[in-house]
Image (tube, grey):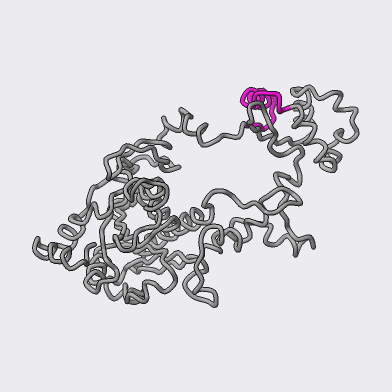
Amino acid sequence: MSYRQRGGPLAGVRVLAVAKVWAGPYAAKLLAQLGAEVIKVESASALDEMRAYGGVDIEHAPYFLSQNTEALSVRVNLKSAEGIAQLKKMIAVSDIVLDNLRPGALDKLGLSYEAMKAIRPDIIHVSIKMYGSDGPLGYQTGYAPSFAAIGGLTSLVGHEGKVPRGMNIRYGDTTAGAAAAFGAIAALHHRERTGEGQQVDLSAVEAISGLVGDSLFAFGLTGEPPVHRGNTHDELSPHGFFPTRNNGWISIACDGDEEWRALADELGLAEPADDPRFTTHESRCLNRSALEAELGRLTKALDGSDLARRLRARGVAAWPAASSLDLMSEDLFWSNGTFRMVINGNGDARPVVGSSWRIEPDGAELERGAPTLGEHDEYVYRELLGLDEDEYAALKASGAIS
């Protein structure tokens, strides 16, 4: 039984998402974009914090709307014994339980992985925690900036010689969420082969550390600790962002003398071959700061899009730095379905970022936005769990559904 068959490779898979804020809902959204039915467990007494951020009410909060596309919302009061009993019934009819609650929160409700297996032996439990669910630091909790800082990413971001800047996006949450979705799919594959469920215990910090790459081992190999170096590249110069007209920026990466000569010619750099600071690749790397200052002086009077086109025509990698508004006006992203309009449970039409993949045949339909609180109570309790009208009314009256 399914609320609405939307196609996709995960059609028929049901995900029970006891998840809030960003990392858990992001993982659920990726699974929904592959066709899974995602049921989001919520309650009025323990709202997802994202329902309170930036909107006029809990049904119009933009962060919540962006991260819960195609989710179904069911109210379950987890402070109620009867609510917990109903949640266990939901586990029995689900394939995956996804949670990013505080460490130990589900265990205190009597819903450890072992307890879930007693309800459904082949259940898959995907758990997102700061350090995973066990170990000496498994009790700690945190948010995306914590993941990025402890995972080693923040120390690598920022201009040389200045305070690390981090990034003004929830990089830690989305990285952990994507890794959790990947783990869920791997566990589904394992179950299909063996009939066994699995527990996927994800550490958000380790997910970030896995992206830091060679910097993890740089000190052992070179004797020099890795530091933030702006946009510097060890083997390319110039390499970075340069100002353009109307407060814009252009990304330019130059590989070798031929590309350098083309860049210098397009910018009208006076006699570049005669300046010993910039004559060779080695000298350009040694004099990187002076080179970038000179290029910035020339680019800031030029149109970034035009300059980028001219440089690419001559074999130099160059692109204007796109803002969010630039991206939203990009025809390609609308025509290929990256951006699309959906209808939220509150009745509003809203643009969303769709999946970054194209699956043919049988890609999943993406038409619904985020749900209103408890929008799918009747579907879950009456259809999935089979409660009659009196039982359903009694749960609402007792506060188990609230």
Please give the name of the residue rendered at 60% of the width and 63% of the height, measured from the top-left corner: 150
The stretch drawn in magenta includes residue 123: no
Residue 86: which quarter of the image?
bottom left
Horizontal side, residue 129 vs residue 315: left or right:
left
> Residue 386, position in %: x, y?
14, 62
Q: Position of residue 272 (x, y in %)?
A: 85, 27
What residue do we see at 57% from left, 34% from top? 322
Question: Percent x, y for residue 351?
Answer: 38, 37
Left or right of residue 308: residue 291: right
Q: Quadrant of the C terminus?
A: bottom left
Task: Assess whether residue 316 is covered by the magenta stretch.
Answer: yes
Foreground residue among 28 and 141: 141
In this rendering, the answer to whether 261 lies above or below 238 is above
Taking the view exactly as shown, the residue that stands out farthest to the front is: 56
Q: Nearer the viewer, residue 167 or 222?
A: 167
The boundaries of the magenta stretch are: 299-319
Of residue 265 and residue 379, the one placed in the foreground of this image is 379
Question: How far across and down, in percent of the image, does residue 327 sit?
Answer: 50, 34
Q: Is residue 336 above or below residue 171?
A: above
Image quarter where the N terminus lies is: bottom left
Describe residue 290's horizontal placement relative to residue 296 as left or right: right
Res. 250 image quadrant = top right
308 left or right, relative to 107: right
Is residue 314 placed above or below 284 in the rendered structure? above
